[in-house]
Amino acid sequence: MSATALSTGEVVVHKSRPAVGLLLLLLAQAVGISGYLLTHLDVDGHLPGAWPYVLAAWFAVGLATHFVVTRKLPYADPVLLPATFLLVGLGLAMIHRIDLIADPARSDAQTQSLWVVLGIAAAIAVILLVKDYRILRRYPYLLFLAGLVLLLLPLTPLGVELNGSRIWIRVFGYSFQPAEVAKLVLSLAFAGYLAETKDVLAMAGPKVLGFTLPRARDLGPIAVMWVASMLVLIYQKDLGTSMLFFGLFVAMVYLATGRSSWVILGGLLFAAGGWFAYQRFAYVGVRVSSWLDPFSNYDTNYQVIQAQFGFAYGGLLGRGWGLGRPGLTPLAKSDFITAAIGEELGAVGLMAVILVYGIIVARGLRTALSCTEPFGKLLSAGLSLVFALQVFAIIGGVTRLLPLTGLTTPFMSQGGSSMVANWLVMAVMLLVSHEARRPVAVRVDEGDVASLSADATQVIMLRPSQSPRPEPRTASSPALPDDHEPPARALPDPDDAEATAAFTPGDETSTSTATRPITTDPDEPTQLYRFDQEEL
Amino acid sequence: MADLIVTLLKVAFLAVLWLFVLLVANVIRTDLFRAAPAGVPGDAKDKRAARSPEPRKRSKHEAKVLAIDTGPQAGTRLALVDEFRIGRSAECALVLDDDYVSGDHASLARRANGDWVVTDLGSTNGTFVNEVRVVTPTVVTASDSLRIGRTQMRLET
C-alpha cells in the first residue's frame, strides 16, 4: 500500500467548477422541496400556505452553504455538497410526511430542520477555522483518548437507555449520541497515528503460514479498540456501533499497511466477540432471528416485518409521496427511514438514494487517491469507509440483508447528533478534497525564500559561495549537465485559475527560463506559493 | 386529485431523482477527462504547462542510492526503497542526526514512472531542492541537490 502512495503516474489538474456545483445543488434541493410539495398535494390536495417561505428558506440555506464552500474551498469536489443536500432534503421531506400521519400533525421536521441548520453552521465553522486540515494530525493520542471517552460515555451515569440500547447521554434535557462524534474524532486519531507508524506496522513481525503477523507490541492499539468495541457490544447493547468502530480501525490499518493479516486477525476477533454475544445476550439472538426468519415470531420482529410489508407495498415505483403507510413501522423516521423511502418512492427511488450514498463514498476514496500525503489519504479513505460501513449496515439491516443494527442513516434519519456529526465529517471531506485537487505549483521563487529570512521562522541560509551541488564523487555518478543554476520555472498567474497547471516532469528541455516575479494577492483563492509558516 | 396526475407526478419525481444521479455521473466523467494531464504539449488549455521549462535532463537510469554529502553524516550512502521518510525521529527510515532537521521532515517516494518525489512534511526549516525551498511534492533527479537542515544529499544511479 505504501509503495503505491504516489504512484498515480501523471499529474491531473482539477479545475474549480463552481457553476457545475451550483447546478447540481439546485437540482438536488429541488428534489427535496418537491418531495415536500408533492406530499401536501397528495395528502391535502393543495399546497400548504407556508410553502413559499419553506422553499425560500431551503434554497437560501443551500446557496449560502454553496457560497461559503466555493469561496473558501474552490477546488473541493463539486459533487459532495449537492449529494449531501439531496439526502438531507429527502430525509426532511420524509420526516415531515410521517409527521402528517399523527393527528394532530407533529412538528419533528421543524426540529430536524433546526438541526440541519446547526450542522451546516458547524461545518462552515470548521471550514472557516481550519485553514489546513493537516494541523488535525498533531494530537493523535489525545484524539484517540477523546474518541474512546465519547464512545464509552453512555456507560457513565450520564447515559440513558432507550429502545434497549444504551448509546445516548442526557445533558440538560437533551439526549445526544456521542458515538456519532466519536466517528470523526477516531478517524482523525487513527489517520494521524497510522500516518506516523504505518511503516513500522507494515515491516515488522514474524511470518507464520505465509502471513506476516504483527508484532506483539504493535497489537496494543488493535487490542484497545477490540476491548472498546466489545464493551459497546456488551454493555451498550449496540451491535452496529461496535461493528462500525472496530471495522473502521481494521480497515484503516489495512489501508495504511497493506497487510491482509490485520484484516484476518480483526475479522476473527470480531467474529469471536459476536459469537460470544450471540450465545450470551438475548438481544443479539433476536436480531439474528429477525434477520433469518422474521415470521417465526410476529411480535418480537414486528418492526422488521412491517418494513418488509412496506417495501412490498411500495413495489417498483412506490406509492408516491404521502400515499403509502410508512407510519405503521415503528421508528419510521429514524432507523427505518429507508423503509419509508422504499414504500413511497419504490425500489427505483431507494436505488437512487443508495447510489447517492455510493457517490459520496466514491468521491471520498477518489480524494484519498489524489491526496499526496499519508494523513490526508488515510483520513479521507477512513471517513468514506466508516460512512460506507454505516450506510451498508443500516440499509442492509432494514432490507434484511444483514442483522438489524441500530445505526442512523447518515443525513436522512431523524436525530440531531447524527446530523451535526455527519456535517462535520462532510466539512473535513471537503477540506481534504480541496487540498487534494488543488493545482500544485512545483517550485517557489527565490524571492519568497529571501523574504522568509526576514521573518521569525528559522531559515538556514547557506553561504552563497557554497556550490548548490557538490561535485560527483563516485565513478558511478552520471555525467551532470554544466549549468548549476537552479531550474527556474514559469509560474502561473494567480489570477488565472483556469490555466493554473501543475507541472509534470516532462522530457522537453525548453530554454525559456524566465522567472516571473510573484505578485500574490492574498485574497485570491489560488495562492500557490505561500508558505504555511507553522512551528513544529 | 386525479389518479393520472398523481401517477405522472410520482414518475416525474423519480425521473428528476435519477436525472440528478446521471448528472453527477457526467460531472465525474468530465472531471476525469477534462482535467487535463498537466504538461501535455499541444493541449491548448495547458499552454503554460507546455511552455514551462524543464531544464534538467532526466537521467537514463533510475536512482538507486541516496548519498549524503555534507552535514553530520556526510559519506553515508543509503539504498533507496519505494517510499520512506527522512527526519530526526526514530520512526523515520533515514534518521538524520542534525539539529536543524524536524522530527518528521520530508518523505521521498518513487512514482510508477521511476521519478523520485520529495515531499516536505511541514518541517520547520524546509526542504530545499537546488537551494529552492519546496512546498509541494517535487521531482528530484540525480542531477539535483537535496538539502534538509544542514545535510546535503543527492540521488545516485
Image (spheres, grey):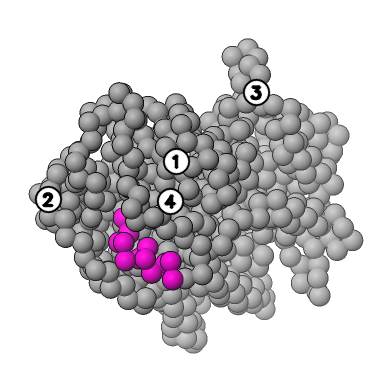
Nearer-the-camera pick, A334 or A453: A453
Q: Please tell me the numbered disc located at residue A205.
A: 3
Instruction: Give me the residue at 37% from left, 76% from top.
Output: A522
Q: Which residue is mark 4?
A: B127
Q: Which residue is mark 2?
A: A511
Picture quarter with the C terminus of chain A:
bottom right
> Is B2 left, or right, of A184 in this rendering?
left
| In the image, farthest residue toward the top | A209
- Tell me if label 4 and label 1 are in contact, CB under 8 Å: no
Instruction: For mark 4, give the secondary structure.
Output: strand
Q: Are marks 1 and 3 on the same chain?
A: no
Nearer-the-camera pick, A257 or B146: B146
| Relative vertical location of residue A332 with respect to residue A300 in this rendering, above or below | below
Q: Estimate the spatial distance between the alpha carbons at disc 2 and disc 4, rounded to whole Å.
A: 26 Å
Magenta region: A443-454
> Is A479 left, or right, of A327 in this rendering?
left
Question: Is the residue marked by circle 2 packed among few (<14), some (14-19), or many (20+) residues within 10 Å?
Answer: few
